[in-house]
Image (tube, rainbow, N blue to C red):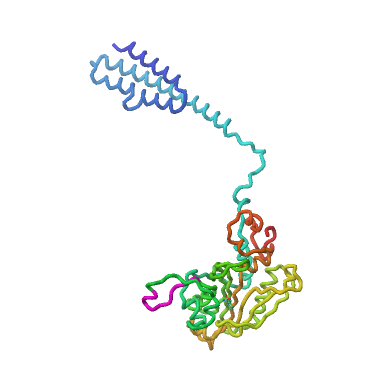
């Protein structure tokens, strides 16, 4: 009954296979021919209803048909895959002789603040200092009181503090939270949580209500703190002098320690550097405040001032970045202007090292 029937089906399927234009098309033909509800399984399904003598020869014929269709499908698929690959090779051809595109590593720039911090960290790490950090939102107690600046102290006004709205704290009779006005609260945090000897530097953002060409409401400081049983003012002078020489990459640097006053240090000094280090002979530039940590501060931080002493400094990071790299206006540092960053920024491969130099290619 089915001889002609089968060969017609076979030539139909073979025609469909030949006509399939791409891999998706050939897959469709495969499903319609061999898939679960396809034509070949349908033919097989007829076997059950056939008389036994017909069943044998019809089954064998369908098996042969299926083998030939399968072979035809694979052959066509192989050919189509070859075509697809040839097409991709032609369209995705890469000209390996073209010059390399610059890409994100070469395009991106390190901000001078980050660069200068990396330089400073490198110098102080070499002298055995670790890096510590603290939060920007600080308590009145850590920003002022434990630094020997009690509530009625005039220094509080000089700090032009940003206070946060803290109705719950005020209802409880507590002082409001504030944006830290200096990195010195991290001195306190460190003394409260670590045992001497302590040798840390602390980079961070600080906030004061102030804005002109040399002041922005947010700026950066780097704090230093050394606490042990014997360290003294001479050690501090030496460390700061070594720092300046390494940072400005000069053999000799003129430094001037002027007596000053901070509630948390005694004695206190402000330090100027001779600006010949940056090519302005005869001028002095103030870069930091420093002093011996006040015994009261040591005591309020839970250490015995009879046993421990130490020194601290606070340096304007933006300030010395401007000095070293000749950046005229502080406000430009925070404007996120790409042209400015391309000019004053550093490439990511220009990592400062003591051996290789501090900030050679940028600036
Ligand atoms: N915290 C001081 C300031 O912001 C600087 C300073 C730090 C002075 C540590 C002495 C010791 O002006």
Task: Check the image and report above or below for 43 versus 223.
Answer: above
Above or below, 192 against 211 in this view is below
Q: Position of residue 196 (x, y in %)?
A: 53, 79
Instruction: Give me the residue at 25% from left, 14% from top.
Output: 53
- Percent position of residue 75, x then y: 47, 23
Say which residue appears at 51% left-offset and 29% top-offset: 84
Q: Residue furthest bottom?
A: 306
Residue 156 shown in magenta: no
Give the residue furthest to the front.
212
Q: In the image, is residue 234 above or below residue 112? A: below
Residue 327: name its quadrant: bottom right
Which quadrant does the N terminus fall into? Answer: top left
Ligand 1 in which quarter: bottom right
In the image, 300 versus 174, the foreground residue is 174
Identify the magenta region: 169-179
Q: Nearer the viewer, residue 162 or 317?
A: 162
The residue positioned 43% from the left and 74% from the top of the image is 176
Horizontal relation, residue 154 to residue 351: left or right: left
Could you say which quadrant of the image residue 234 lies in? Answer: bottom right
x and y, in percent, of residue 318 in the image: 62, 67
């Amino acid at each position: 009954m089915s001889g002609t029937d089968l060969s017609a089906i076979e030539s139909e399927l073979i025609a469909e296979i030949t006509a399939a234009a791409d891999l998706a098309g050939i897959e469709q033909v495969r499903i319609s021919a061999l898939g679960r509800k396809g034509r070949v399984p349908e033919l097989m399904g007829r076997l059950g209803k056939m008389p036994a003598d017909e069943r044998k020869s019809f089954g064998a014929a369908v098996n042969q048909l299926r083998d030939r269709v399968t072979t035809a499908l694979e052959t066509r698929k192989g050919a189509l895959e070859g075509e697809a690959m040839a097409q991709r090779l032609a369209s995705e051809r890469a000209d390996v002789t073209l010059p390399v595109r610059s890409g994100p590593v070469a395009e991106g720039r390190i901000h001078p603040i980050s660069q200068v911090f990396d330089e400073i960290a490198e110098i102080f790490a070499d002298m055995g200092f670790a890096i510590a950090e603290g939060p920007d939102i600080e308590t009145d107690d850590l920003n002022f009181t434990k630094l020997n600046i009690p509530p009625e102290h005039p220094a509080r006004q000089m700090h032009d503090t940003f206070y946060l709205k803290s109705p719950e704290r005020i209802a409880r009779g507590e002082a409001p939270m504030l944006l830290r006005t200096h990195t010195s609260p991290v001195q306190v945090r460190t003394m409260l949580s670590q045992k001497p000897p302590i040798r840390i530097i602390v980079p961070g953002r600080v906030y004061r209500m102030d804005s002109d060409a040399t002041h922005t409401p947010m700026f950066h400081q780097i704090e230093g703190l050394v606490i042990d049983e014997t360290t003294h003012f001479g050690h501090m002078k030496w460390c700061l002098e070594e720092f300046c020489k390494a940072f400005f990459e000069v053999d000799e640097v003129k430094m001037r320690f002027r007596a000053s006053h901070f509630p948390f240090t005694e004695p206190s000094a402000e330090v100027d550097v001779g600006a010949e280090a940056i090519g302005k002979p005869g001028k002095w530039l103030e870069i930091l405040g420093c002093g011996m940590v006040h015994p009261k501060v040591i005591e309020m931080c839970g250490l015995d001032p009879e046993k421990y002493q130490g020194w601290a400094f606070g340096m304007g990071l933006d300030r010395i970045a401007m000095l070293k790299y000749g950046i005229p206006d502080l406000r430009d540092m925070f404007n996120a202007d790409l042209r400015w960053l391309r000019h004053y920024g550093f490439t990511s491969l220009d990592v400062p090292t003591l051996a290789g130099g501090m900030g050679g290619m940028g600036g």
